[in-house]
Image (cartoon, rainbow, N blue to C red):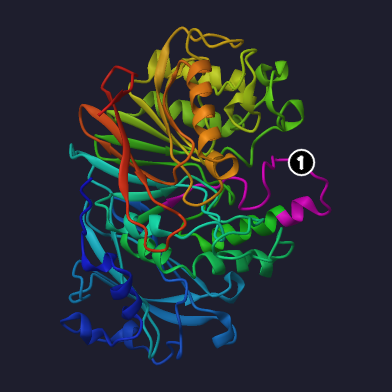
Amino acid sequence: MTVTRRTVLGTVGVLGAAAAVPLEAFGTPTLRTAADASPTLVAGATFPEGVMAGVPRTDGAMLWTRVPRGLFDGDAELAVVVSKNRDLSRPVIVETVIAEKQWDGCVHYPANGLAAGAEYFYQFRGKDKVSPVGRFQTLRPADSNQPVRIGFFTCQGFTEGYYSVHKHLAEEELDLVVCLGDYVYEATVPGVRGIDLNLYPQVLPSMRAKYTLYRSDENLKAMHAQHAFLPLWDDHEFRNNYTKNKWSLPELFFQEKKSAAWHTWFERMPVPRWTDDMTRTYRSLRLGKTVELFAIDNRQYKDDQPCNDGSGVVCEAADATGRSMLGPDQKAWLENGLRSSGARWKVLANPNMMMGMVTGANGERAFMDTWDGYGAERTELLSLAADRVSDLVVVTGDDHDTFSGELWNTGFAPGTPGNPAGTKRAGVEFVVPSVSSTNTGDLQGEAKAKAEEQKRLQYNPHLKQIDMRQHGYGVLEVTRDEASLSYRAVDKLHPDAGVSTSYQLRTGRGSARLEAI
């Protein structure tokens, strides 16, 4: 693979040093006047969780940082500076912002009025301290035919491995990075970084502590400072396999704890909120004529899993009509968006596997928490894609293993044992591996994982590639005529692990078929 460094900001050393050196060290000084030199800026501010630019638009992005509240009482005033220049000279934005006490010292600043498809740099400043310098790129203009490159990661249990993945993501040439869910884990698996004793957070401070722990990683902060970011919500941000109504285990005050988890996610993520629907996360981003990216929520509107959330089961209820993964409003939004999109490629950022995954000769399905437990809605969505949506690419997280497959309108290719055979092709799906969370190879060892890979290929003719042993991330590159996914493999057990391209697969316009590159 060829990994290039877009700017020196991609290195942890430069980013880490940014908060400790005066602005003049970056080059031409930026004048501290008006908002940038306000006498009411907070003194002694620190920025231990770094900076982020989220949900990019053609004219801006949401800029984020946090000042720990132990340093001040009440709200704190900062300045934010945005410039096209890495040294922050000739800024296009200089304004004051408030780190609010009710949001635990977090800042969400909507940077507006910027140029489309342009690179920007930004920094937050207190009276005597400054944050690391961040970088992001606004979305490409509406008439752009340029290729699009998006990085995807998922499932990054902190204690289970190091985050070399994020070091390498920071070095990629990307339009943005998408987290497909499970940015933090409510539970913990002991691993190379010990154990997190903050199990199943019960109150707001312990939920906030999860994000503070994860953001202590320098590689994660470097990635955030280098690329625009779009996060999806899944389950471990609160409880494994929870649905809109319950968790699989009884839990007192379930709704109150879920609300606290949502509060923390919106607080710690660089995302704008919908004024008429404060917990909505699904949205679309248009990247020129090449791609429209649809980011969906498979959790907060989800009906309970069928057959007691079983695994490796034959479950008639899994295909019952009326059961929903998306909920009626989100489903209507997604179907309308896919039908009406003028982009050449429709890319669906999807937290849970969409294609069917059979594990036995009788048609047993792997997990009821995926789209396999919501077969009727899946068939409706994929039938629409087969009939009226050209060039659908689904990129998925959650599973921890690596899969590439072809999507049929029922989720199953002809010849799949014990399940309804599809009659029309609908698109392709790439499932990226976990950053660090336990995969099949970690649990069963390499020999058993390889045997399971062969069994899955035997029972799932729509499955074209599988690896249940590697960790890493994915890079999707989309041009006018093809979409390809490069799987990057990174050893989670070594803090300075290198990166290699383990698999590359492509699909051409109008084919809904996968082939190896």
Compared with residue 507, is residue 248 higher up or lower down, i.e. above or below?
Answer: below
Badge 1 crowding class, 10 Å Cα cut-off, few under 14, some 14 to 19, many 20 or more, is: some
Q: Is 352 positioned to the left or the right of 139 in the image?
A: right
Q: Which residue is mark 1?
A: 248
Query: Of helix, strand and loop, which one carries label 1?
Result: loop
**Residues in magenta, as a range:** 230-257
Q: Is 233 positioned to the left or the right of 492 in the image?
A: right
Q: Nearer the viewer, residue 439 or 347?
A: 439
| Residue at 60% across, 65% down | 194
Q: Position of residue 157 (x, y in %)?
A: 55, 55
* Residue 54 in view (yes/no): no
Say which amino acid is labelled 1: Ser
| Residue at 26% across, 22% down | 509
Q: Position of residue 44 (x, y in %)?
A: 46, 90
Dominant secondary-structure state across the stretch colored magenta: loop
Q: Quadrant of the C terminus?
A: top left
Q: Is residue 151 magenta?
A: no
Q: Nearer the viewer, residue 387 or 453?
A: 453
